[in-house]
Image (tube, helix red, strand yellow):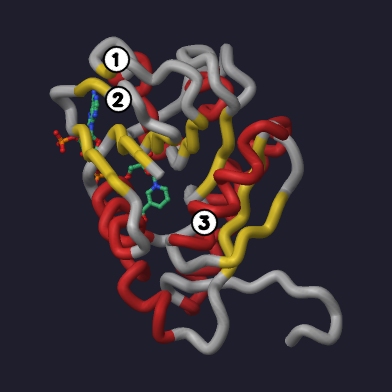
Amino acid sequence: MKIATIGRGNIGGGLAKRWRATGHDVTEFGSEGGNATGSDAVLVAIPSNAIENAFTKVAGIGDAIVLDATNAFTGRDEAFESLAHQVKSHVSGPVAKAFNCNYAALYDEIDSQRVPPCCLYAAESGAVGVTELLIRDAGFHPVSAGGLGSARMLEDHLGLMTAINEGGLGRFFYRYAMPGEL
Ligand SMILES: NC(=O)c1ccc[n+]([C@@H]2O[C@H](COP(=O)([O-])OP(=O)(O)OC[C@H]3O[C@@H](n4cnc5c(N)ncnc54)[C@H](OP(=O)(O)O)[C@@H]3O)[C@@H](O)[C@H]2O)c1
């Protein structure tokens, strides 16, 4: 799959490395932007307050499936239901919220776990297949939280993640499972 990442930091660069390892063709853009023409999927992995600016500098997104990994560390525009909805306002393809509830600092430890850690996501129906594929190819197990209407819940979930982290667990993986699977 041809993938472009808007942002090449902890998340963009980290996922690019993992996706390349599974055979994807990944191009990373930083704050200078770039041309995403021909991409099947586009990852948005930039500070939340850079969303508006970033989409003025990236051309050629077209109908690509867009995965938004942003969290509201640097604020949000409450005119949008979620950061993912703000991203959606700039693109024409289906959008998913994914990877925002997983620590990039743990990417290098994914492969040494007993089972794949989970990655919560919320996606429009047209984005589900590619989102699940790219979550699996990053080494995670996808868990759906429903449609894009759940994106804000995933963004707000950061508060609970931070509380758990600071409650003593530190940065963590998580696993949602059906009874009998654990
Ligand atoms: N780090 C985590 O564990 C984690 C987990 C879940 C979600 N998130 C979220 O994911 C997003 C990225 O986090 P990160 O840790 O990867 O950040 P990061 O390491 O600081 O990387 C940020 C990237 O955004 C680019 N950027 C900044 N301003 C831009 C602009 N105006 N236009 C285009 N690109 C711009 C930077 O470009 P340059 O390369 O040119 O500087 C850089 O590549 C944030 O919303 C964060 O809250 C982070």
Residue at 59% across / 26% down in the picture? Answer: 94
Residue at 43% across / 61% down in the picture? Answer: 138
* Separation of marks 2 and 3 at Cα, in angstroms: 20 Å
| Picture quarter with the N terminus | top left
In this rendering, position of residue 14 left or right of residue 165: left
Q: Amino acid at mark 3?
A: Ile
First in residue order: circle 3 vs circle 1: 1
Q: Quadrant of residue 36?
A: top left
The residue carrying mark 2 is 36
Q: Is residue 107 above or below residue 12?
A: below
Given this view, does label 2 or label 3 mark the residue nearer the observer?
A: 2
The residue carrying mark 3 is 135
Question: At which x and y percent is residue 173?
Answer: 51, 72
Judged from the image, the secondary structure of the residue bearing numbered disc 1 is: strand
* Separation of marks 3 and 1 at Cα, in angstroms: 25 Å
* Separation of marks 2 and 1 at Cα, in angstroms: 6 Å
| Picture quarter with the C terminus | bottom right
In this rendering, position of residue 78 left or right of residue 113: right
In this rendering, position of residue 130 left or right of residue 47: right
Question: At which x and y percent is residue 47?
Answer: 32, 34
The residue carrying mark 1 is 59
Judged from the image, the secondary structure of the residue bearing numbered disc 2 is: loop
Residue at 33% across / 61% down in the picture? Answer: 18
Q: Is residue 167 above or below residue 71?
A: below
Mark 2, Cα crowd under 10 Å, few <14 / some 14-19 / many 20+, is many
Q: Amino acid at mark 2?
A: Ala
Quarter, ligand 1: top left
